[in-house]
Amino acid sequence: MIYFKNIKLYELSQRVSVEISFSLDGAKLCDGFSLLSAGVKITDSRAVDPRDGYPMCTKDDGPFGRLFNNQSQNYCFAEKSLIGKDTKKAYQKFADIFNFFANRKKHCLPASELGPAIYSVETWIPQDLASMWKSLNTGCGGRKNEDTHFCHLCTCSGNTIV
């Protein structure tokens, strides 16, 4: 929870839920090899930028003052990376991180020698469609693969193609 201390959410997280985003995606390095990276992005509007003390969700835009900005790479923290083929099997190597955040939404982080208990963490998981398919081990697009579903959101499968 070092992130929370630096951005002034630590004390707040002991009383109420705070919000972060977690994402996973692959970037092709060369034929057959990709860099898969998972990370956390601070998206809670109450977070404070440790560099200037302003809310992290705003930016200084000169004559227009401080504008809403939640798209900065400055607030992304890599958690785990893997070099290999961008496949469903590779995405399973990140299951521990998905499970950690799923449990933080349901249960607080218990008190330990590292500090007091942390209230639940609202976690959003924005990913592109291919990454979502691989993470959930479902979906394959429009390929005809018998009973494999096209998408994690629909019931259409390969054997329904006419």
Image (cartoon, grey):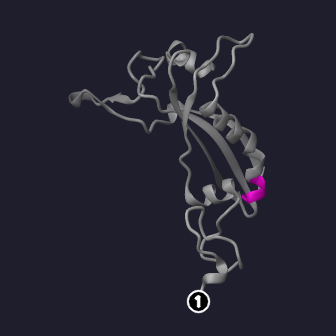
**Is residue 120 in the magenta section?**
no
| Residue stretch rendered in magenta on the structure | 86-90
For image coordinates 62% across by 56% down, the residue present is 131
Q: Is residue 62 left or right of residue 36?
A: left
Regarding mark 1 in the picture, which secondary structure is present there?
Answer: loop
For image coordinates 46% across by 36% down, the residue present is 72
Where does residue 136 sit, x and y in percent of width and height? 67, 55
On-image quarter of the N terminus? top right
Quarter assignment of residue 5: top right
Residue reaching furthest to the left: 63
Relative depth, front residue between 89 and 113: 113
Which amino acid, by three-letter code, is at mark 1? Val
On-image quarter of the C terminus? bottom right
Q: Is residue 85 in view from this perspective? A: no
Q: Which residue is mark 1?
A: 162
For image coordinates 64% across by 38% down, the residue present is 102
Q: Is residue 48 left or right of residue 100?
A: left
